Amino acid sequence: MLCADLVNIQWTDETGRSHRTIANLEDISLSGACLQLDHAIPLNTKLRISYPKGQMEGIVRYCVYREIGYFIGLQFQEGSGWSRKAFKPQHLFDPRRLTAKPPKVRPAPPVQLGLPN
């Protein structure tokens, strides 16, 4: 699901130092999420997303820089996936809605034109 929301994230670096910051949640699914940050986070770092009713934990699987910042791909750990009931991002959009088939429209009945007698 495409989304936009600010989330709190935490992680511990390789030296054992804890970090906290706010990230932009770009998309989310049952198995992972994409976050936008101002700085990189190393691959395989364990990261926690906190929200008012709980948290989700995952492992950083990619970190790429694109014109406006770093995009972090997070794979949720087993038992820590996303549930729409537990956390609904502020702006949430299902891209499958773009490819949904339009409703069928019944053709109008044929019009009979009467010819003059």
Image (cartoon, rainbow, N blue to C red):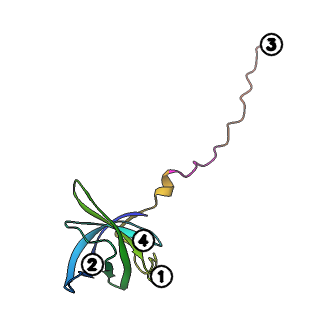
Per the image, the residue denoted by label 3 is 117
Q: Which residue is drawn at 26% across and 81% down?
A: 10
The correct choice, above or below, for 15 with respect to 111 in the image is below
* Of callouts 4 and 3, the N-terminal one: 4
Q: Please name whichever residue, 33 or 5, is drawn nearer the observer in this view of the structure.
A: 33
Q: Please name whichever residue, 56 or 77, is drawn nearer the observer in this view of the structure.
A: 77
Q: Please name whichever residue, 17 or 87, is drawn nearer the observer in this view of the structure.
A: 17
* Of callouts 2 and 1, the N-terminal one: 2
Residue type, numbered disc 1: Glu
The answer to whether residue 91 is left or right of residue 117 is left
Label 3: few (<14), some (14–19) or many (≥20) C-alpha neighbours in 10 Å: few
Per the image, the residue denoted by label 4 is 32
Measured in 3D between alpha carbons, the distance from the residue under mark 1 to the one under mark 4, in whole angstroms, is 11 Å
The x, y position of residue 50, in whole percent, is 31, 82
* Of callouts 2 and 3, the N-terminal one: 2
Place residue 40 in its image quadrant: bottom left
Q: How many labels does the image show?
A: 4
The answer to whether residue 14 is left or right of residue 56 is left
Residue stretch rendered in magenta on the structure? 99-105
102 drawn magenta: yes
Per the image, the residue denoted by label 2 is 9
